Amino acid sequence: MAQPEKQFENQIKRWLESQGIYKLGTPANKMTVPPCGYYEKRLGSAMTGAGKPDLLVVVKGRALEFEIKCETGRPSELQIYIISQINKSGGFGTLVYPKDFEKFKAYIMELKK
């Protein structure tokens, strides 16, 4: 069984796809609703860049960075620093906990308009 953070991440991905925001590279014949964006799962490591947010989500040309945490998860100092850098540069980066899922969905829906 998947860990709570992975379960929450999968829930987010399923919801994004239901809104036309598909995993980068999804074939058109696998899209069930018209596309309006994409997401990319990030894997952080010393080689690829530790501390990067878990998901890059692009909605109608707007790039968003999300660090996904389960209710008891805590971000590292590096994750907080990187999200801060994203926001200071005019981007959008944030932590998402299960309690924030409705707010997350509302924000994405607003961008889709």
Image: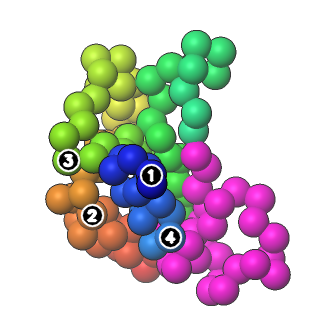
Q: Along the line of sight, which residue is nearer the eye, 25 or 14?
A: 14
Q: Earlier in the sequence, mark 1 or mark 3?
A: 1
Q: Earlier in the sequence, mark 4 or mark 3?
A: 4
Front label number (2 vs 1): 1
Front label number (1 vs 3): 1
Scheme of colours in the image: rainbow
Q: Is residue 3 above or below residue 103?
A: above
Residues at marks 2 and 4, CA–CA distance in whole angstroms: 13 Å
Residue plotted at (52% across, 79% down): 18
- Circles 2 and 1: CB atoms closer than 8 Å: no
Residues at marks 4 and 3, CA–CA distance in whole angstroms: 19 Å
Q: Which residue is mark 1?
A: 2
- Image quadrant holding the C terminus, namely bottom left
Q: Residues within 10 Å of mark 2 (few under 14, many from 20)?
A: some
Q: Is residue 29 above or below residue 61?
A: below
Q: Which residues are magenta?
A: 16-41
**Residue type of the residue flagged with mark 3:** Glu
Q: Earlier in the sequence, mark 2 or mark 1?
A: 1
Q: Along the line of sight, which residue is nearer the eye, 25 or 63?
A: 25
Q: Which residue is mark 2?
A: 101
Q: Which residue is mark 4?
A: 14
Q: Position of residue 82 (x, y in %)?
A: 39, 24
Q: Position of residue 61 (x, y in %)?
A: 58, 59
For label 2, the SS is helix
